[in-house]
Amino acid sequence: MLRTTRFVKLIPIVVAAACTAGCGPFGYLKKVAKESTRAVADAEAAGAEENAPYEYWGSVTYLEQSKILMGYSEYERSFDYGERAKQLAEEAKKKAEMRRKGQMDQRAEGVATPDELPAGADGDASGDAKASGDAKASGSTDAGGAKGEVKAGVSVGGGK
C-alpha cells in the first residue's frame, strides 16, 4: 500500500510536466488553438483582409493546415504551421494598421507608377521605336532568272 500512495502523489506532477512541456495535444491547445487563432482573429479585426490580403490569407491557410495536421496527430508539423500562421497574422495586422493610418502606400511591390517609368516607355510610342508602319523589307531573288522586290508594312502597337 505504501507504493500506491507514492504513485498517486506522482500523477499530478506527471500531468503538469506533460502540460507544460508542450507535447501532443496540450501543445496544440496552447500554440495553435489559442495563440494562432487569436492572432488571425486580431488581424481580421484590424482590417487585414482588405489592407494586407497576402499576409492575411496566408495566415488563414496555414492555420487551417495546422488544424488538419493535428487531426492526423502530426504534432510537430502542426505546431510549425501554427507558428507560421501566427507570424503572418501579426505581420498582416501591423501592415493593415499602418495602411489605415496612411503610413504605408497601398500598391503592388515591383509595379512602377507612371512617374517612375523610363523615358519613352509610357505607352504612347514616342521615342526611338516608333510604331508607324514605315518599316519596309526589300530583297531580290534569282530563282529561275526572275527578279523581284518584296515590300511589306509592319505596324506595332495599336495600329495607328
Image (cartoon, grey):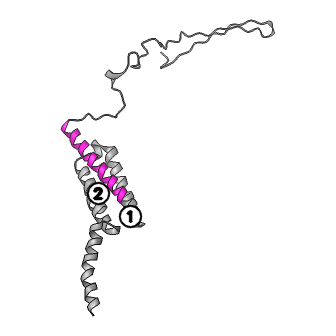
Residue occupying the point 24% across, 35% down:
104
Q: Is residue 3 left or right of residue 102?
A: right
- For residue 40, above or below residue 8: above
Residue occupying the point 28% across, 85% down:
7
Residue occupying the point 28% across, 46% down:
91
Q: Residue furthest left?
A: 101
Magenta stretch, residue numbers: 79-102
Alpha carbons under labels 1 and 2: distance apart: 15 Å
Residue 97 image-quadrant placement: top left
Toward the viewer: 86 or 142? 86
Q: Residue furthest bottom?
A: 1
Residue of label 2: 36
Q: Residues within 10 Å of mark 2 (few under 14, many from 20)?
A: many
Amino acid type of the residue tagged 1 in the rendering: Tyr
Residue of label 1: 75
Q: Which mark is residue 83?
A: none
- The image shows residue 59 at horizontal and vertical percentages of 33, 51
- The image shows residue 103 at horizontal and vertical percentages of 20, 35
Frontmost of labels 1 and 2 is: 1
Q: Secondary structure at mark 2?
A: helix
Amino acid type of the residue tagged 2 in the rendering: Ser
- The image shows residue 124 at horizontal and vertical percentages of 41, 17
Q: Is residue 97 left or right of residue 143?
A: left
Which numbered disc, 1 or 2, marks the residue that appears first in the sequence? 2
Toward the viewer: 78 or 4? 4
| Residue 54 shown in magenta | no
Residue 127 image-quadrant placement: top left
Residue occupying the point 36% across, 30% down:
111
